[in-house]
Image (tube, helix red, strand yellow):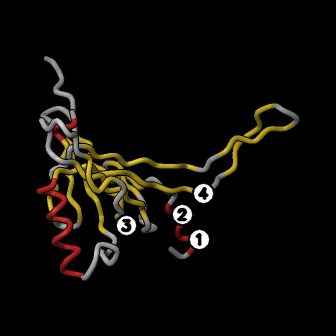
Amino acid sequence: MSTHHISGMDINVSLGTSLINVKQFTLNIEDGVKETTTRGVANGFVNGVTGASGEITVDTENFNRIMEEARKVGSYQQLPAFDIISLGQTVNQTLKTAAYGCKLSVSKLIDAAGDGGDKLEHTIPYKVTDSRFVEINGVPYLDQSHLETLGL
């Protein structure tokens, strides 16, 4: 029996409570763990700053859905931070990610080719701002005991 693997076509993305059809979606984690050395020889590691960010590329129809939310709150910059949930699922595999407290910006307002043939695209970068950070299949990325120590 062959396995039906998850592809980009199987990924659904929700921004807050709205389902957004994306052309591309990325979620990157920057983990500040660094190796340590003693006189040039590997000897353990130290923890560092962690962060997460990504980009969503959408067509104009889906961009306008986000802009309608911005209109309701007064401006794009006033949009609250959203949770971004993605779910990829086939008969054989599931991958669910949750990025909490994502603050949106715009990097490519318009990406238009003069010869046509493709829809307009809009690129929306985001940064994860919530201490819940990121979960992968329900498993937190960050050490929860460290968060408790920090009172978060």
**Side of 106 where 36 appears, left or right:** right
Instruction: Identify which residue, 121 or 66, lies in the foreground.
Output: 121
Q: Are marks 1 and 2 in contact (CB under 8 Å)?
A: yes
SS at circle 4: loop
Q: CA distance from mark 1 to mark 3?
A: 25 Å
Residue indicated by mark 3: 103
Disc 3: CA contacts within 10 A as few (<14), some (14-19) or many (>=20): many
Q: Can you give x and y, in whole percent of width and height, for residue 16 in the image?
A: 23, 67
Q: In front: mark 2 or mark 3? A: 3
Q: CA distance from mark 2 to mark 3?
A: 25 Å
Residue indicated by mark 1: 149
Instruction: Identify which residue, 60 or 104, lies in the foreground.
Output: 60
Q: Can you give x and y, in whole percent of width and height, for residue 96 in the image?
A: 27, 48
Task: Give the residue displayed 17% in from the left and 32% down from the top.
Answer: 92
Q: CA distance from mark 4 to mark 3?
A: 18 Å
Q: CA distance from mark 1 to mark 2?
A: 6 Å
